[in-house]
Amino acid sequence: MFLSMSGKKENFLSLYLRSARLYYCFVSGATTLAGIAFYRYGDNRPWGWRECLILFCGFAAWGINQIFNDYFDLESDRINAPSRPMASGKLAVKPALCLSSVLMLLMGAAVLAFAPAALPAVAAGAVLNLLYSKLKFIPFVNCLLYAAALSCCAWFGFAGMCGTNWEKALSISSLLISATVFPMHFFMCSFSYYKDKEGDRAAGVRTLQNLFPDDVTLPLHALLLGILLFLFLKVQSELSFLLCSLLLLPLAVELIIFLCLKEYHSATKINCQLCAVWIICLFAQFNLYLFAAAGISLAAIELLYIWSGSDSKRFVTGFEKLLFYAGMSLRCVARLRSLPLLWKAGIFTKIFFCHKLLQLPSGEYKLDFYMPRYPSEAFFTAMEDKLISRPPRPVSVVWSITRACTYRCPHCYQGFDPAEEMPLEKMCQAARELRNSGVAAWAIEGGEVLLRFERLTALLEVVRGLEVWVNSTGSGATPEKIARLKELEVTGVMSSIHALSAEEHDAFTGVQGSFRTALEFLKECRESGMLTGFNSVLSDGEIIKGGIDRLMDLAAENRCDYIQLIHPKACGRWGNKEFDLSQHEKAVKIACEAQKRYNSWRKKNFPILTAQVFEESPRMLGCTAGAIDRFYVGCSGEVQPCEFINVSFGNLCTTPYEVIYERMRRAFPTPGSDWLCCKYAPVIAEAVARNGGKTPLKWEETEKLLSNWTQGTPTALYEKMGIYK
């Protein structure tokens, strides 16, 4: 039985916890722990309820207070972090503020009842936090106030342990512990302003980062951080020096590197880890258990950061990607309830490891353009399709709802398809059958889908909650239509960019202004919260002349997430086109190298490149046509192995999907490395010409061609998995 794939909206509590940014709670929690450790110096008795209560209050204080900070920072967050729940409008402001107020009052009552001597620390922290929110526009002063406010957590930890001993709670010792943690918080605040430069400047918040260039502030920060770390390590005992060095030095170096690379959101997480771990290490040489707490905090911040999602879409590489895949594999085994599947899951997902991970603000991840978001229900259905179902089922479908289009692109693979459309009810019924059979990823296209918006929205209602992409030129787009796409949970939109200049693109489509229309449409979709990308066909000559790099520059400039690079196909209107193959091998090599380069950490800030010649290479998936991984449904209901192979295995208006599916599985029993769209293009073109030039060939004609078709060498990936037997 297939897993349920109904879409799930985030509830209020989930949005509240994401806004609380629980990974930051380890900063206030570590500072409170420092105060408790200072009070308990030399006391080896087990912890009691008082320690646990005080530490919990110190830990929770950050998250509860963060809701108030997000409210006060709404103006700058709409620029710096528009995807945050409150800034995006997903989190209801008044209920969130009310919940934080209630929780704050409950914690205050607990402190009043069991540790009244800590109330001055609570009051001081609240006043300083309020001052920070009002005076954060003053350079240097903002960092001083922030550090002072957070340092009160150490005072709170110490004073909380004093219970009703006011004299000890207000002693020099309480001020000493606060002064000790002050420098770490000062640096944390100062480093955190790098990611907020643009929004702070627009909101009038003046920081060193927007008063001076990075080549001035970064060396200064690195120098001062190095001096402080040197002084700290110098006073440690031999064992403590070793452990502190192993924990702190890599984080400090990593922080500076990520800031230099302008990877501000990754730097934010490292900044949080460095501050929390450093503060715990202050007293770890007197209690080695604290080193264990530092290590746990380091890992917990990493996991909570991944769970919470970043403040914007971001690309993940390196060690963080390795951690993700390890956790994902274990979750797949738990979800599918089969430990033996771990090996097959590892082989299957290994091919995606060469891609950058795209982390969404929701906390979900895109492993690959063709795979649903993890950990959506659609993702686990796709994994079930490949790992459990026998025979394995296709993951994705490309579905055309109309041929209606005002553009006249010369390479259109639907150019000679019938113009009639499936009846709306029949189309939706067929889509439900595909959904129920396990098809989890959908690309919906035209023609131009926005010209037949009623059909588009009807189909989107059927597949709501799955991985859904819409291909559109943007012609006919309105704010209302874009908002409706978002409401229907469309994952992303793709527009075809046929050339790297407006003049060439417009000449290709035959429509003046089509280049600008596509880019403006993508911009509006991106601002509404959908992913965006280009579909591009570049000739071998264009690739050899550097066309991929220029395309990626254009995509980065327009803040796209994905680029799908398609090699030219002899199909549709290009069915009889003869391509010069003298440069093809060189162009394929360049495209594959570009895919590796743009999916590495060296090009981390560029969109993800998905080149078909790489994805369908023998080392990857090979040719996935014919319901191995994908197939195509034309607007009249004809089902093709893929959009580039103009042969039909039956029409959904007259033939049940199960029958058509079985025909494809018999024709393509095992995945192979030959690209069928290229290998049999001449044969298909000849047959199309004999049958009046209309595409696709009907099933009766298709069946005659299949007897001589071979798929080439079996794909190594699927042979290792052993799922096609």
Image: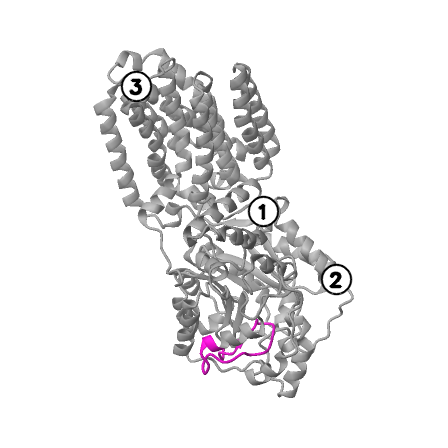
Q: Is residue 448 visible?
A: no
Tell me if mark 2 has few (under 14), some (14-19) or many (20+) residues whose alpha carbon lies within 10 angstroms of its own: few
- Disc 2 secondary structure class: helix
The single residue placed furthest to the right in the displayed view is 582
Residue bearing the label numbered 1: 605
Q: Main secondary structure of the magenta part?
A: loop
Q: Is residue 643 magenta?
A: yes
Q: Earlier in the sequence, mark 1 or mark 2?
A: 2
Residue type, mark 1 in image: Asn
Q: What is the spatial separation of the Cα atoms under label 1 and label 3, in whole angstroms?
A: 48 Å
Q: Amino acid at mark 3?
A: Met
Quarter location, residue 336? bottom left
* Residue 149: percent from left, percent from top: 38, 26
> Can you give x and y, in whole percent of width and height, for residue 490 in the image?
44, 61
For the residues labelled 1 and 2, the Cα–Cα distance comes to 29 Å
Pick the quarter of the image with the N terminus: bottom left
